[in-house]
Image (cartoon, grey):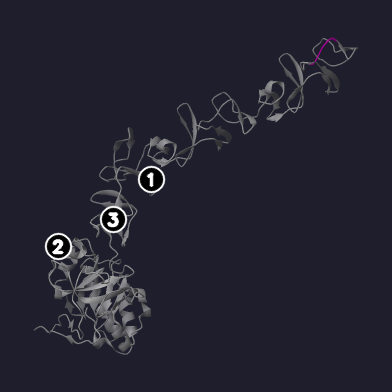
Amino acid sequence: MNLKNTLMTLAAVSVFGVAAEQQSIIAHAEPYITAGQSNTPKTDVVDVSSYQGNLSVQDFQAMRSKGVMGVVVKLTEGTSYTNPYDATQVNNARAAGMRVSAYHYAHFTSQSEARDEANYFADRAAKLGFTSSDLLVDDLESSDSKVSGITDNAKAFNDQLHARGFANTGLYTGPWYINSSGLDVSFIGKNRTWIADYPDNPTSQLHTDYGMWQWSSKVSFPGVSGNFDVSSDYVSMANAKTGYLLDTDGQWYWFENGQRYTGFRYYMGTYYWFENGVRFDNAWHEAWGHWYYTDANGRAVQGVQNIDGQSLDFGNDGGFYLRSTGYIFDRSSQNGGYRWYENGQLFTGFRYYMGTYYWFIDGVRQNAGWRSAWGYTYYTDDNGRAVQGIQTIDGKVYNFGNDGTYYERNLTGYIYDGSSQNGGYRWYENGQLFTGFRYYMGTYYWFVNGVRQNAGWRQAWGYTYYTDDNGRAVQGTQVIDGKTYNFGNDGTYYLR
């Protein structure tokens, strides 16, 4: 593709009457540039045709070392020409780890011709293994295509590619062609348009409102024969690389559509985990609702594995995910790196461990706090253990039983709750501080809001009683405040 300010084309015709590739002749002094030369625009993408011949894998790797990540290969022209080197160029560029796209040099002058050319292009692209995610470009620069209805024709070409299953399409043209033909690129959008314009002194990025800018056709790469068209790709139209690729810093990264990827990717027979493109070894990973472990070589493990002194099962069915149950050291950031797994899943709820119950949320042991489970209420202490017996929590007393059930039940009885009276004990009834008589240690005591009352008269059950200095209801004959009273000796305690 060599679109210039002034354009003339030479068409070589074979003895069979088939048009060979057309090369444009430059009408101004475009400078020769060596890739990597300072103060020049980015060389994200190169495009090649039969003019470059049989480029090797090493040739494309040399381009990569100078920042090129995308190659656009000419496949077809009109409805009868195919680049004789396209398969070699496509396969070798792919082998070098580059994102490979394709273009078609258009001659159509009507919508029906546009659809025919699109089908011819699509047939060849499919044969070379291009898929719906690969970029296919309509190269619209030929003078014979500049007819009334050029925009509708270009849209028909684009629509036909979509109909053939190629959804990622683009348009190549230049300011000269747009101005002289009346082409309106809005049908595809500027961000899907590859604009060609070669400044005499390319020192900065231009045409940044387009998807790509082809800024020279005279760039050479050290060690590679010939000159190349180069472009700056502003929106990753043609350099959205995918796979485990050597980047320009000399390091390998996993790319997904041009971005360094985070997550699992299947590669060389197993799954590897990447974070911002970097492979992660000896680590736990969560994906697809399961947990996985990658070993020292970054490979997701299978079978029974000893990890940090634990024997863990990752299955042998090609699933790679954890199947084990228990408190597993997975190097988490809480509780010393341990979390509770249930059949390979991080568990929420109670689990019995080391002589008591612990409460977990997403595998993480929870410490002091109230818990609800199995229709009951529980409390776990500062060490995460479910408590039993009488416990004072936030200044209030609770009963969790002593029968190994751990759940809260109503307080009933004379219970030490640290109160300021009567040695810290108070009487509870069904969890409430009680007012009235309760039988305890061989006699009746009178309580007000749980506090034992000592010497005084009491009214209960329609009778009158008296409790002594120790709070005990009296019996028999008693002298109270200098007066004699009879409280009986039949265990009823009331005044008669």
Label 2 neighbour load within 10 Å: few <14, some 14-19, many 20+: some
Depth check, mark 1 against mark 2: the one in front is 2
Residue at mark 1 to residue at mark 3: CA–CA distance: 22 Å
Q: Quadrant of residue 129?
A: bottom left
Q: Secondary structure at mark 2?
A: helix
Sequence-first disc among 1 and 3: 3
Residue position for label 2: 58
Question: Amino acid type of disc 3?
Answer: Trp
N-term-proximal mark, 1 vs 2: 2
Q: Which residue is mark 1?
A: 290
Q: Nearer the viewer, mark 1 or mark 3?
A: 3
Against 307, residue 134 (above or below) is: below
- Residue holding disc 3: 254
Q: Tell me the amino acid under the disc marked 2.
A: Gln
Which SS class for mark 3? Answer: strand
Q: Nearer the viewer, residue 126 or 70?
A: 70
